[in-house]
Amino acid sequence: MHSNHLTSLDGDWGHSKDALTNAFFGDNSIIEIPKIFNTFESLVWLNLDNNNIEEISEDTLPPNIHTLSLNSNLLKSFPSTLKFLKQLTWLYLRGNDFKNLELPDFQTSDLELVDVSENCIEWIRTSSLSNRTLKIKEFNLDSNKLTLLPAGIFDHLEIKRIHLSSNSIKNVDDDAFRGLEDMLEYLNLENNDLPSVPGAVSRLRKLSYLYLANNDIRNISGDIFHEFGENLRALSLATNSLDAVPVAALSRCQRLLHLNLGYNKISYIQSGDFEWAEDLEILLLRNNILTKLKDETFKGAKKLKELSLSFNHLTELSDDCFIGIEESLDILELSFAFATDIFPQRALRPLSNLLWLVLDNNNFQTIEATAFYSFQRLRYINLESNRLHYLPERIFLSSVHPELRDVKLGYNFLEAIPEFSFHNLTELRSLDLTGNRIKILNSDSIMDCPELVTISLAYNRITKMERNAFYGLPNLRFLHLEFNKLTTLDLDAISEIGGPDFALNVSYNAISIINSGGLMNNLTRLDLSFNNISHLPADTFYGTPDLKILDLQSNFIVVLEPGTFTLRHLETLNIRNNKIEGLRKQSFHGLELLQQLDLSENQIAQLLTEQFRNLKNLRILNLSGNKIRSLPRDVFEGTKLEILDLSNNKFTVVPSPSFLEVGYTLRDLNLADNFVDHLDSTAFPTSQLVSLNLAHNRLTILPDNSFVSLGKLLSLNVSQNVLQANFKELFHYLPGLRQLYLANCGLKDIPLLPLMNLNVLDLSFNYIDSTPDKQFQYLKDLKILLLVNDSLTSMPNVKLNLLRELDVSGNPIEVLMKESFLGYPRLEKLNLRNLNKTKSVDKDCLRVLKYLKHLRIQTWPEADGFHLRPLLTGLPLRTVEIQVTEHLLKHQIQNAFTKQLRELTISGNDLESISSEAFSTIEGGELILRIRDTRVRRLQSDMFLSLTKRLSQLTLDLRNNHINELSPSVIYGNLSWESVGTNMVAGGLQVSGNPLECDCEIAWLSLWLRRWLRESRQIHTASQSDARQLRTIAGRAVCTETTPSYSSDKVLLTLGTPHTACQASALSSGNYERLATTWLAIVDIILLTIVAY
């Protein structure tokens, strides 16, 4: 029952309490576990993540529970009642608000995991365990506030794995791990403030996994790993300040399998540095300052399987640099690795067993035909984002590359597919040629690749596909040809390919003619959207009889000829946004299985009798945005309509007779944005309707029986109608109504609504100036109340015990008192923006809202008693939007938020300057920081540097300001961004809508974007569809190029004109100088997953 807005688990559980074994109640609004749960003897797994639980009372938990998850609740301390759970094995308490940790005397004998990460723990006590030892196999203390580890901090505990990353630990006592010397196997101290490897670590004789990344370690003593070196399997020293491989310390680590030395300052590797590494399998040296690899650089690491040298500045590779690992190496990563455009063929040649070769973003311009002939086991090769204009024919051969599965050649300058290079590759699954300059697909371009699943040729310049351009591809499922210049779609070119479920995307071309060619029984999905099709002959799709999804939106189709869609298997047809003025009676003949039909945004004025009669399985019909005034009585006869959208048409009366045929199937009806001026008892002969939208019509007087037939209605929207009605009688017939929207209805008073089950009520944009408690007498279950832009001069004085969301923005409220919110004890979401008449704000007015997670607020610098920080302090806020009405944001929000803050938005038309200390106290996990719609012109140096150190991931949104200068120092301070990389803002950066020019001052952003895609978003491992989506979003990055005669936006990812003047002034290393040989553009990076709007 995850994400159901449950407020309580009390109730009659019947026989469930005897049979229930696993229960998931996460992401609700539960404040306590009911006592009945202690009778659930079969329940062994209970998930209550992301609720509002403040404490665990005695005798509430199921007695036999073995897995308990209470992540992201409001617990202030470790629940001592958990000690009675004898079967407890897995305990999750991440993201609560513990200030300290005192472990109780558990009755359980063995705990597999205790996770208390992302709390605020400053100290740990185990005194209650003085008479026994508690076994915890894995103890997670990541992201807390432990600045030091004193002696004996883990006394009375037997632990095998400890996580202590992101704690700001500076000191570790030599006896910190006392008692664990012969037990601890795993220790994570990443992302702390350690100046050296702690001496306490050297005593851990059984340690196998040690992670020390992202500290400030400069030197490592030779004997630090002496005690456990022979046991060590994995070691991370990444993101420190090492200038050489710590050979002396590693010399006893002969059994080490995984070593990460990335993101240091290593400038050289001596021959012999890895003589000790006889078992090493993975070596990561990315983002150092290596320039040369000498003979036998990795000699000794004879079992090395994976090597990463990405983000270095290599200029010279000895022909024998990989000798010694040539037999063992499977994976070699060299992204952004070279400061030269010469392909290192001779150095790579000995690596005869390579399976995975990554060479993207290296400025290579030419490659010899034999470049990859020595890699006869090669499965994956990535040459994306180089400067290849030409690939020699036969660069890949079936006899040489029998195992090749994935080839990435996107975003080069290729003008043709190399001949005979993609023939008979029997294991090839994916071929990506996106973003090149290919103009013609010649016959036999890609043929006889029996396992090929996906081909992408999107974003090229293809004007023509010759017959049998693709041939002998029996398992092809996806062919991407979108964003090309095709004017004719010749299906002959692809008639001999495809598996049983084949999809073709030719959207965003200039196609006006479709030549059906031979029979293609396997084509099931065809995307022809955003082309120039104006006419579809009746035989257009004769050759593709098995289509299931057909998308024709945004073309210029005027008429649908009878017989055009004789497609017996078609389930979805999209003809949105064309020029259709009328439909013929047989326009949809032959679509027996059609379930979804979209005809919106056309110019249809009339539908014919029995227009959709043949569509026996039609469930969803969208006719919005047309010019329909009326409907024939039997227009929907024969269908099974469940969702019908008639919004934004010309209806003056509800077409009631037309609904008779679907009265028992219709569930959702949208008649918004029409001209309907009256209703009566016969308007809706649709007894099963659950959602009705009548917004923005011309309704005035509503008879009491208007909704008499809608007893099952759950959602009703009559907003933007000037209504007169006896609401008490009107809604008498809607006893189950859950959502009611009465925004902008000319209401002066809140109507009495006899709706006992109502959850959502919108009374915004009316003239309501008071909220008498009696008007809410029936609304005790109300969860959301919207009163935006009404005439309230004071906060609503009403008690709604279950209210979850309240919006009173835009009202002339004068005072926010200590008692203003007493009536909403369960409030989680509150909007107090645009309260421009407020004169007094009590600093404790929000204190009673102990469950408040989402707040939109403004500042009131002139109001009595107003201080933003005390107003917000102590609230469990997750997302906050602040409309700043001052000119300067300085210390107003310092120390105002908990570690659980996930989104912070700063806006304000008056805001001109932001201090570099404004965000200095924010800490936690992942944060999206938005500074939008302000008058800020420049950002202070170091403004975001503290955030990058105190957060696990930062996303920056700087859109729509007045920023005219943006330096990397804003994020990186005095650090060189190239040496640090893009992971400091791994979530991404958005800066569109600012007056920035394409000049040298923002050159770093152009390079940052490319590297962010590869480094932080790992685009090289993404699927073709995900990678395409990432690049499409990044492709929105533009800057303005201005000359005396014109100005124009330039898209970063499609630019190619050299602009070498920036090389010396804006870039610091050769590796990035050669990447700057394009016009440099401002970056507008918009996240997918990551930023939620």
Image: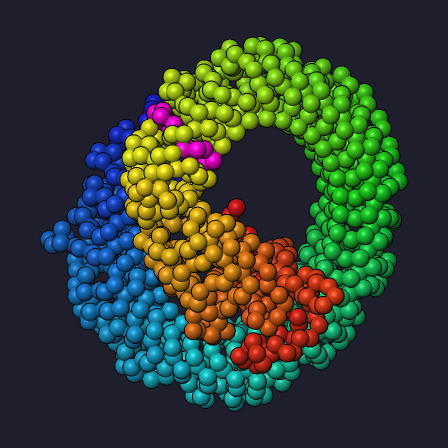
Q: Residue at x 57, y 65 (%)?
A: 1009
Determine the image quadrant of residue 339: bottom right
Please identify the dominant SS of the magenta region: loop
Q: Residue at x 55, y 82 (%)?
A: 314
- Give percent across and percent down for residue 109: 21, 49
Q: Residue at x 68, y 56 (%)?
A: 453
- Give percent across and percent down for residue 775: 41, 18
Q: State yes or no: residue 804 in magenta.
A: yes
Q: State yes or no: residue 1074 in magenta.
A: no
Coloration of the structure image: rainbow
Camera-side residue of 93 and 773:
773
Q: Locate the N terminus and report the quarter of the image it occupies.
A: top left
- Give percent across and percent down for residue 682: 65, 11
Relative side of 251 to 299, left or right: left
Determine the image quadrant of residue 252: bottom left
Q: Residue at x 20, y 35 (%)?
A: 58
Determine the image quadrant of residue 773: top left
The part of the chain drawn in magenta is 796-813
Total marks in image? 0
Camera-side residue of 395 and 119:
119
- With respect to residue 514, does 472 lie above or below? below
Q: Is residue 128 visible?
A: yes
- With respect to residue 625, does 220 lie above or below? below
- Give percent across and percent down for residue 192: 32, 66
Q: Is residue 95 visible?
A: no
